[in-house]
Image (cartoon, rainbow, N blue to C red):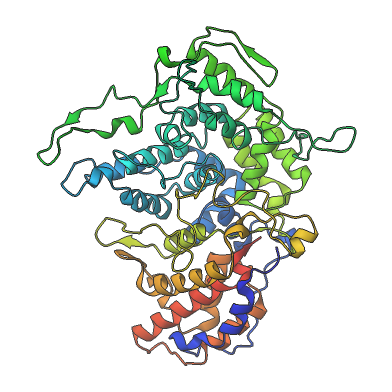
Amino acid sequence: MPEPKSAAFTAFALPLLSACGGGGGGGSATTAAPTPPSPTTLSYTPFGAARFLLQAQFSCSPSDVQSVRSLGFEGWLTQQFSAPQSQSATAWLDSRNFYVPDEKDKYFNPVPGDWMAWRMLMTGEDQFRKRCALALSEMLVVSLNPIDGFWPPYVIAAYWDLLNAQAFGNYRTLLEEITLNPAMGFYLNTRGNQKADPATGRVPDENYAREIMQLFTIGLTQLNSDGTPKLDAQGKTQDTYSQSDITNLAKVFTGYDWNYDRVTWQSVPWLTYKIPSPEFSRDRMKLDAAKHSNEAISFLGVTIPANTAGTEALKIALDTLFNHPNTPPFVAKQMIQRLITSNPSPAYVGRVAAAFVNNGTGVRGDMKSLWRAILLDPEARTLSGGVTAGKLREPIVRFAQWARTFQVSSLTGKWEIYDTSNGDWGLGQSPLRSPSVFNFFRPGYVPPQTALSANQLVAPEFQIHNETTTAGYLNFLTSIIKSGYQDVKPDYSAIIGISHQTRELLDWLNLYLAAGQVSGTTLDLVQSALDAQPLTSTSSETAKLDRIYSAILLVMASPEYLVQK
């Protein structure tokens, strides 16, 4: 990938940022950093293990690296697939008594949903599962932004729990669960969607019918098995569906609404109405047959006869989309983009799509097979020196990586990290806060007037990367590295003992933050900045921490860190 726009800022700022606090000592700035192995010898070196881990999850620790080197990539994946899930988002909200109504209208307040989301990303041993769930959340999008009414944090938490529960299951099951999920029902209007009524002019809402095809399964254009577009005799792309397909499919998604069967209603003295308990947020939406369309449905060449029961109509529709030839390459390419590279080769997409079609035992849609194929493919496991390889790390992944690498904890247990979507002072991105169903960035986004555009390459994450968000990220990083965020604080005890040994400190950060991908030239520049103020083993803890703050900032601001290969 080309250098982000922060490159010029970083190159200018490195010599100046030593004034932020920190010292020198610990060796000459010209000391050569360890050279990462060549691609042919990378696999089970510390660099290779760290690179694999930073593709598969948010962060890596010395014990993680050792585990991969001991088990091998396949063995590590097998271990992760069988590992138990950590505390669910819903259970965490319960543990904080968020289900208890209070006079501050907590039952309407979405903010604990942000605390929950950040805690989920920053804690738990099952971070591979959570990294996969985050990738899925950026394709099967639901956002906390518009969710209102009772218990928004519980509604978005149940969605997140669903993605985690199904991340290693089957895509067909995931597709059905997400279709009937209360958060999705609210977000894309299947909740309360009803059959046509000629007397009033009411017609079924088409939102979910459109998006389940366009964004969740088959996309806009017909694809070959390797994800390349199928062309007609005139060399033009071909649409996958028409407006008629949308209108007909919309009839399938009628008659559903939130399920209140397990809900209890509580009276409180400060309101004239009762408050429901939050069970509805995690139970599948319920079908009311009287509100479901009984018309015949024809879409994508399949006919669902008139008077077909709603549950059977849903099964036929989802089976049709799941078994469509576009679905394997469409899903495969987007998940590759989220974990590995913005521009996978057609051959890479084809291999992953083939694993989706058949996991080796005749099962279609096996998510474990999909993740294995993505992470173990030669294109993923080979470190390319090409300038267009890899992808830009998205901001929430950077923040989660920092948090996990330095073992943040919440002093109060609240995990009071708020919406960080603002690009001026935040990250320009916040988990489960996508601005639209099209995610934070589009999979086909091309930065205009760039070499990427000239070479017909995409760079999805660059859609939220600009001058404003670059400055916002650096300012945000400067603050949280030193002070944490509200009640969430880091622990630098693992590296304070080497803080005075400049190159050893930078080598540690390079390995565990960037898998050795920050070049010796950049490390020399950073070391020069840090060595401007001497530091020794007998320096104060404040001085040592200042050195650590500056080192982390400069590494995480470098283009070679920001672009993950």
Q: x, y percentage for residue 388?
A: 74, 61
**On the picture, is 38 further left or further right than 127?**
right
Quadrant of the image for the N terminus? bottom right
**On the picture, is 497 further left or further right than 530?**
left
Camera-nearest residue between 293 and 534: 293
Q: x, y percentage for residue 284?
A: 40, 26
**On the picture, is 357 further left or further right than 145?**
right
Choose top left, top right, bottom left or bottom right for residue 108.
top left
Choose top left, top right, bottom left or bottom right for residue 118.
bottom left
Camera-nearest residue between 225 and 530: 225
Q: x, y percentage for residue 342?
A: 68, 53
Quadrant of the image for the C terminus? bottom right
* Up/down of 84 relative to 115, above or below: above
Please give the count of numbered marks on the rendered protein.
0
Residue with the most extreme left position: 269
Camera-nearest residue between 371 and 324: 324
Residue at the spot 38% in from the left edge and 89% down from the top edge: 539
* Up/down of 382 relative to 217, above or below: below
**On the picture, is 558 further left or further right than 117?**
right
Q: Quick check: can you spot residue 95?
A: yes
Q: x, y percentage for residue 328?
A: 67, 33
Q: Quick check: can you spot residue 363?
A: no
